Image: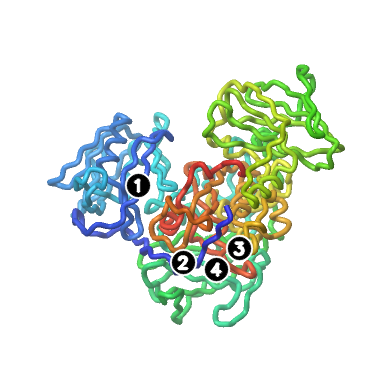
Amino acid sequence: MKRRRRTTGIALAVVLGVAPCSVAFAQTAATTMTQREIDINGQSLSHPYSFVHDGTTYMPIWYVMQALKNLGISATWNGLTHQWAITGPTSVTPQGIAANGLTGIDVNGVRVENAPTLVRADPTTGVYTTFMPIWYIMQAMSYINLTSTWANGIWNLTEAPAGTGSSSQTGNGSSASGSTTATTPNSPLTIDGQVVPTVALANAATNDSGFWRRASESFYVSAQTNNPATTGIGTPLLQVQPNQTLYLFAYTNGTDVVDQNTSWYVNSLDATITPGASEWTMGNNNRQIAKADFVASAPGIYTIQAKYNGVYSVPLVITVGQSRLSSTPFTLPTKYTGVLSLPMGLPAAPQSTHAGLTYLKGAAAGGWIPISGATTRPLSSITVLLYNNRNKTQSFWDYRLPVVHGVFSGLVRSPFTGSVLVTLFPNFLKTVTVSDQTGTGYTVPNSSYSVNVSGPAPTVLRAALLSSTQGDYNMSPEFNAIAATLLENSPSINTAVEAISNYVSESILYNKAELQSATNYYYQDNLSALNSGSGVCQDYASLTASLLQSVGIPTEFLGGLANSAWTTPNALSKNPLDAHAWVQAWNGTSWILLDPTWNGGDQAVNSMISDEFVTNTVSFNDTHVLVPSSSNGLIQ
């Protein structure tokens, strides 16, 4: 995961995410089709082709109707009247709207949406079929007790509990949705069953969930501390204080954005945004971009959004005076990390000694494996490596336990069931680094034994909170202190997620020496990356995950390929420089994609941040491709 390919949004050939306004039913020339996925209750159902037009994803209605059929919901398509009729249970009475010549979506006989549609040939069958923006489809689902989420190219349908309405409202197919766990900034906030303390927001910000609901997928904002009219480098964003001017830019990668038609919004009266009056261009294509000046008079977390010709940008989150923000400490239940203290009174277990380690081979109980031993080696920690003996294609999982006075112990949660191989691995990250540099493979120690793990495996969300050797938040209380401050001072979960990701972008400078030479690359734990302020994409992603997990926000490490020159993801790329890492975080209703490496840009000083790779943006989809075997794998 050594690749960091991020240019500013200039080099990407994408289009402005305006609200769809195409003439209904028009057949257009063929464009690039990308396979997406439709899931029901998290299980894959189909992989239809889709395409991006005017900044939003169009999905084939036929496949959507097959998904509804699997849920027992009736839907019919009338090609003559261009009417899509859905009949299903609902706890709300849809408010009817007048027809306007576009495709009509009717729910239980009531017109609820007028949607643009395009006719394209389905690459799978060659048959021409009707495609509709995913945003309008998701709006329709909200009326029939279906929770519908769109993240990382996957549309997932989940039946809502009886008697409730769906809460998913996402803008133009964006994976970001309004938080359903907090409706006002100072109301009690619950994450993963625990109540997060509330603080009086220093900037008196209002809830910004509406910013996220109306956001498009291909309109972005960046902020920087250096005045672009000068040659100055700028000061670090982490040090931004009240009354300091930040310079904002609103841009797309396919169309001009001019000052005269651009409006700016911020969710607090303690900040002002002054629009620019002169022309600015960006990149080799000389696209026009809109500029504004931002000044906050009080410490706090601010959400900024631009609007151009009626289209809203992805929200940009800026933290001002972070060291002056108050926070009430709260503790994440230890069991969520996957590491517990070893209880007293465990059954006797066989003892083994290998390579300076003496350890007990204890039996697993309730999904937890007891680890205890001693070492004569000068170790400060030891890695517990778990491997699924039954499913050879499944990833390893690893935990780090402290070694104190030569002794280590703990209960670790196995993400696997059945026969699990346990290996006690000294100097694990160093060994991985050496194997990467030499290409000789891992030298696995012989301190291994198998245990049988019974009971259910952790759920996806619970597994997304487990710590790891690199993601060492179980051993780093600093992570919780940082993330708790950002979470408690944010007016919504989505904003907290971006604020934490931006914190990582602003804390680490990319280590170009590691990128340029494989022999300089090394794996490090997240606390080391934070303290050194240096790393590569693996470190950005894993540290972001650790910070989010430390306050109970499930986060998955994602590995794959990325290249800023792509306009279509190349899953077959063999270029090792395309290897990349990013994350997705759970906001209570859907996954939010984050690339803290690319949002930070290529800088000598972390003086600039963008939102181009926050949520399921067009830029994300065009330049990143997930490789499942690289996600949540050997190094988290």
Please tell me whether mark 3 or mark 4 is closer to you in this view. Answer: 3
Q: Nearer the viewer, residue 610 or 551?
A: 610
- Looking at the rendered structure, the kind of residue marked 2 is Gly
Secondary element type, mark 4:
strand
The earlier-in-sequence mark between 4 and 1 is 1
Look at mark 2 in the image and give the residue it sits on. 9
Secondary element type, mark 1:
strand
The earlier-in-sequence mark between 3 and 1 is 1
Q: Nearer the viewer, residue 168 or 429?
A: 429
- Looking at the image, do the residues carrying marks 1 and 2 touch, with CB atoms under 8 Å apart? no
The earlier-in-sequence mark between 1 and 2 is 2
**Residue at image x 77%, y 19%?**
350
The earlier-in-sequence mark between 4 and 2 is 2
Look at mark 3 in the image and give the residue it sits on. 516
- Looking at the image, do the residues carrying marks 4 and 1 touch, with CB atoms under 8 Å apart? no
Q: Nearer the viewer, residue 400 or 375?
A: 375
Please tell me whether mark 1 or mark 2 is closer to you in this view. Answer: 1
Q: Residues within 10 Å of mark 2 (few under 14, many from 20)?
A: many
Secondary element type, mark 3:
helix
Q: Is residue 312 above or below residue 464?
A: below
Look at mark 4 in the image and give the residue it sits on. 223
Please tell me whether mark 4 or mark 2 is closer to you in this view. Answer: 2
Please tell me whether mark 4 or mark 1 is closer to you in this view. Answer: 1
For marks 3 and 2, give the CA distance: 23 Å
For marks 3 and 1, give the CA distance: 33 Å
Instruction: Point out residue 58 in the picture as x, y percentages from the top left corner.
Output: 31, 51
- Looking at the rendered structure, the kind of residue marked 4 is Ala
**Residue at image x 65%, y 47%?**
435
Look at mark 1 in the image and give the residue it sits on. 35
- Looking at the image, do the residues carrying marks 4 and 2 touch, with CB atoms under 8 Å apart? no
